[in-house]
């Protein structure tokens, strides 16, 4: 899932105090010749609220079991996101399917200005001040993945300096 991104740091779940947030539960129906078979799919975001976050999808005949499977899946997909003083290092767009997400860093005291699925992801990461806009699809599955797309493209000033082979001072002052 994260192969397309250059500087993604994968994280092991052991030793982390992870909190899970339920983004959405959908009742899904499979129609067979014997009638309708109902099931549930749950999408969950887990994070330590300090830059580590993961998302997962679980499916089952029962809601609780679907959520448990989603949490397990999310723990397998943990990544570290660069943060800067409780907000993001820079503005970033992300997209997945029909969902497009715009994340903008905000000054201290702004809070998390985000709706539903984006808010769950950003709070799990540990972002305290950010502006966001969901454009296009509002399907929670795609919005979560679009938000992850934006977050995984973020680069800290240190990373940019290393990649360009210049000093940190030169990154900001030219």
Image: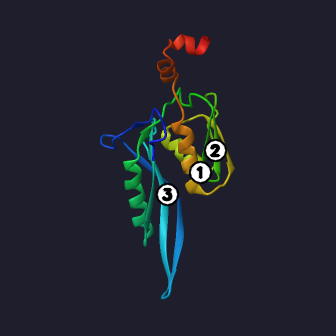
Residue under pointer 1:
143
Badge 3 density bin: few <14, some 14–19, many ≥20, Cα 10 Å: many
Q: Quadrant of the C terminus?
A: top right
Q: Earlier in the sequence, mark 1 or mark 3?
A: 3
| Residue at horizontal 45 percent and vertical 43 percent from the top | 2
Q: Is residue 55 above or below residue 16?
A: below
Label 2 secondary element: strand
Residue 117 position (above or below residue 162): below
Q: Please name the residue that numbered disc 2 is placed on.
A: 101
Left or right, 150 with respect to 55, comes to right
**Labelled pair 2, 3 in contact (Cβ < 8 Å):** no
Question: What residue is pinned by disc 3?
Answer: 43
In-image side of 62 versus 30 (left or right): left
The answer to whether mark 1 and mark 2 are in CB contact below 8 A is yes
Question: Where residue 78 sits: x, y (%)?
Answer: 41, 43
In 3D space, how far apart are the residues under numbered discs 1 and 3 (Cα atoms)? 11 Å
Secondary structure under the numbered disc 1 in the rendered image: helix
Image point (64%, 31%), residue name = 106
> Which quadrant would residue 133 be assigned to in this image?
top right
């Amino acid at each position: 899932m994260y192969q397309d991104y250059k500087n993604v740091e994968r994280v092991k779940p052991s030793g982390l105090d992870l909190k899970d947030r339920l983004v959405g539960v959908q009742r899904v129906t499979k129609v067979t010749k014997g009638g309708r078979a109902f099931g549930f799919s749950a999408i969950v975001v887990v994070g330590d609220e300090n830059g580590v976050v993961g998302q997962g999808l679980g499916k089952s005949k029962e809601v609780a079991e679907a959520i448990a499977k989603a949490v397990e899946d999310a723990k397998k997909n943990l990544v570290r996101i660069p943060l800067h003083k409780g907000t993001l290092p820079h503005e970033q767009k992300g997209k997945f399917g029909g969902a497009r997400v715009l994340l903008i860093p905000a000054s201290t005291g702004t809070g998390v200005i985000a709706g539903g699925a984006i808010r769950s992801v950003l709070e799990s990461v540990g972002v305290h001040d950010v502006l966001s806009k969901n454009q296009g699809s509002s399907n929670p599955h795609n919005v979560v993945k679009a938000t992850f797309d934006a977050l995984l493209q973020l680069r800290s000033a240190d990373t940019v300096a290393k990649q360009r082979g210049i000093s940190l001072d030169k990154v900001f002052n030219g």
